[in-house]
Image: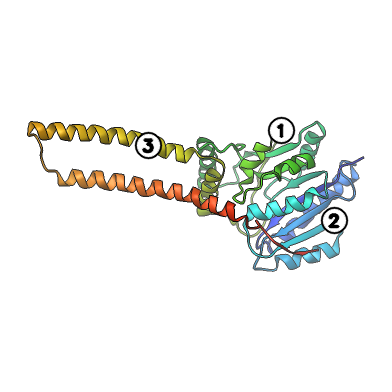
């Protein structure tokens, strides 16, 4: 018996791109059904993340035009990660396997065939990994590579050059939803689930229409959120640095006492200001990092819903 597939696609202000990429997803579903790889009940699920344009209207119309299309709409914009999470939660009670992919058409939809083959070979999680970023600008390529290296350096386990294009079995999804934290970073959480996994490599192409919603600021924010959500390494770095500074401070105190006793003291306004300014800046930065962790704890304790679904097609 063929497996039931649901393709989950988060959408935010995608009125320009949706009419152009809808057939890409539809053709892939129908091809896989005709090949007998997936069940005829398989669906494409669009998740409207509180878009301010006509994205939800387009999704609603698509659902009326073709039974393969379904849609849910969040009550407000909750961000890409929460929109994707909402779609995955909706899919796990419906499908045997779930594939998440962006709406812009940059990820090669044909890699889904290889993902399903890997699943049939025993993998519960199959990561879509980019092996060619020539379509990216030099700046974007350099910052993206630095992004993955920074995450790994800070202790967040992520698959290099993998975003959110992946296949997950129902077993893997059910296990994943045992992670109940509010501050989610899917790229780092999914590897923590375990189970057998594999990678499928593909070339990322240029965006078909519209413009990317991920600028440098959002990428840095995503990286910082990923690090502080998955690792306490920044706290340990601060602790280690504080210990080293304490040793240096103790040495300076001893030196000051000895200088005073030997009568070699000399006033040095510039050196004092430099030292105070440096360590003052370090202290403020450290307090900020610790405050970020405390803020995340506050949000976790409140247990507010990560998203609210307002409409379904």
**Residue 119 as seen in the image, left or right of residue 75:** right
Q: Secondary structure at mark 1?
A: strand
Compute the Cα span from label 3 to label 2: 56 Å
Disc 3 or disc 2, which is closer to the eye? 3
- Image location of residue 168, percent across then percent down: 75, 41
Q: CA distance from mark 2 to mark 1?
A: 28 Å
Q: Is residue 64 above or below residue 201?
A: below
**Quick one: label 1 or label 3, which is nearer the N terminus?**
1
Precedes in sequence: disc 2 or disc 1: 2
Quarter of the view holding residue 57: bottom right
Q: For marks 1 and 3, give the CA distance.
A: 38 Å
Split into 4 quadrants, where in the image is the N terminus? top right
Q: Is residue 174 left or right of residue 66?
A: left
Crowd around label 2: few <14 · some 14–19 · many ≥20 (10 Å): some
Q: Is residue 198 left or right of residue 263?
A: right
Residue at the spot of label 3: 241
Q: Quadrant of the C terminus?
A: bottom right
Check disc 1 and report the residue beneath it.
Answer: 198
Q: Which residue is mark 2?
A: 68
Give the number of the disc on residue 102. none
- Name which of mark 3 and mark 2 comes first in the sequence: 2
Residue 61 in view here = yes
């Amino acid at each position: 018996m063929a497996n039931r597939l649901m393709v989950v696609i988060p959408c935010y202000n995608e009125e320009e791109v949706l009419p152009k990429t809808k057939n890409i997803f539809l053709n892939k579903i129908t091809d896989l059904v005709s090949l007998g790889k997936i069940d005829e009940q398989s669906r494409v699920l669009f998740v409207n993340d509180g878009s301010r344009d006509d994205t939800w209207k387009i999704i609603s119309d698509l659902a009326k035009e073709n039974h393969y299309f379904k849609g849910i709409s969040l009550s407000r914009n909750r961000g890409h990660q929460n929109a994707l999470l909402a779609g995955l939660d909706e899919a796990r009670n419906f499908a045997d396997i779930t594939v998440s992919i962006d709406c812009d058409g940059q990820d090669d939809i044909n890699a889904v065939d290889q993902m399903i083959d890997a699943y049939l070979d025993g993998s519960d999680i199959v990561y879509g990994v980019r092996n060619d970023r020539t379509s990216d600008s030099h700046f974007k390529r350099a910052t993206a590579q630095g992004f993955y290296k920074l995450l790994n350096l800070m202790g967040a386990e992520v698959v290099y050059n993998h975003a959110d294009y992946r296949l997950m079995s129902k077993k893997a999804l059910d296990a994943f939803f045992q992670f109940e934290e509010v501050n989610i970073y899917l790229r780092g959480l999914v590897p923590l689930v375990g189970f057998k996994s594999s990678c499928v490599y593909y070339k990322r192409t240029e965006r078909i229409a519209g413009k990317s919603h991920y600028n440098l600021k959002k990428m840095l924010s995503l990286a910082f959120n990923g690090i502080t959500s998955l690792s306490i390494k920044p706290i340990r770095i601060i602790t280690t640095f504080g210990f080293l500074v304490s040793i240096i401070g103790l040495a300076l105190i001893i030196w000051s006492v000895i200088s005073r006793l030997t009568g070699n003291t000399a006033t040095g306004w510039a050196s004092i200001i430099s030292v105070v300014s440096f360590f003052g800046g370090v202290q403020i930065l450290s307090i900020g990092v610790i405050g970020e962790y405390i803020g995340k704890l506050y949000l976790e304790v409140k247990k507010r819903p990560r998203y609210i679904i307002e409409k379904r097609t």
